Image (spheres, rainbow, N blue to C red):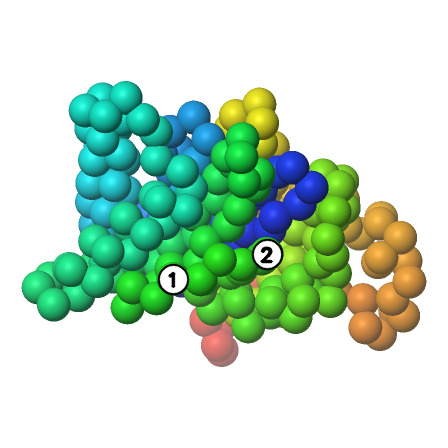
Amino acid sequence: MDTVMGIVGDGFCIVAADCSAARSILVFNHSEDKIVELDGNKLMGQSGPQCDTSNFAEYIQKNMTLYELNNDLQLSTHAAANFMRRELATALRKGPYQTNVLLGGFDKSAGPSLYYLDHLSSLQKVNFGAHGYASNFVLSIFDREWKHGLTLEEARAIIDKCIFELQTRFLLSQPKFKLKIVDADGIRELWVTDVPYWSEMVAGSPMMAALSPLSRPTFAFDAGRGMDDDRRERGDQGGKRVGD
């Protein structure tokens, strides 16, 4: 039920993920950070059970730090991706990690890069990618909108369209997303968005204005409303039994 997306632009890589921690039919919180900073220029977005994602992220992070201390050399993004693939492949024959990964990084020699890994240890360098059910909705947007030399504003607009599509079409509610960027200046957080703010923002956007009234989605989120408010609007008399 996790959503992780990534895109490569001109001199940067963005990874976005929802912030919902859930299991089965229960949502624990909406403040989970699913994007782990491995070092100063690599970050990893993960989807899967929290126990596996947490264990795998900590294992990779600490071993990369140990390698750097022992050899006085930091792994490149390509080397880190292959190290992760090797660990997933080894665990596949013993106790597999149920985790899918998008690894984004920036190297002075190679520039920005994004690597797609799944729980079966397949590895592919990509320009954009997504994990989770959300990939059924957002991959077509990435495929249509991505181009070489994307600016930061253009890349954020593509992520905006993907989140808007999920808020409109996706069955599951994912009210908060977090975006992180890695570039020559290191890693920083772009923004975190919540459903009420997001709904108000897209409702007045040119993209929404271009939609016909029949195809325009509606947002009926009101944290202050309750069942009593709905009954009063309908004129119901709560608490009365039939025949009273």
Q: Answer yes or no: do the residues labelled 2 and 1 have beta carbons within 8 Å?
A: no
Q: Which mark is residue 26?
A: none
Across and down, in percent, residue 198 comes to 68, 46
Q: Name the residue that disc number 2 marks.
A: 127
Q: Is residue 117 above or below residue 178?
A: below
Mark 1 surroundings: few (<14), some (14-19) or many (≥20) residues within 10 A: some
> In the image, is 184 to the left or to the right of 54?
right
Residue 82: horizontal and vertical position, in percent? 32, 52
Find residue 204 and report its horizontal and vertical position in percent: 85, 48
Which residue occupies 21% across, 35% down?
A: 63
At a point 40% along the width and 38% down the height, the residue shown is 76
Type of residue at label 2? Asn
Query: Considering depth in this image, is 40 or 23 the residue closer to the camera?
Result: 40
In the image as oriented, which residue stretches furthest toward the left? 94
- Residue that numbered label 1 is attached to: 123
Which one is in front, 7 or 24? 7
Residue 122 position by quadrant:
bottom left
For the N terminus, the quadrant is bottom left
The three-letter amino acid code for the residue at tag 1 is Leu
Residue at position x 67%, y 67% in the image = 143
Q: Is residue 145 above or below residue 70?
A: below
Q: Position of residue 93 (x, y in %)?
A: 12, 67
Can you say whether 208 is above or below 190 in the image?
below
Which quadrant of the structure image shows residue 80? top left
How many residues crowd around disc 2 within 10 Å: few (fewer than 14), some, or many (20 or more)?
Answer: many
Describe the element under mark 1 as helix, strand or loop.
strand
The CA span between labels 2 and 1 is 13 Å
Residue occupying the point 51% across, 50% down: 114
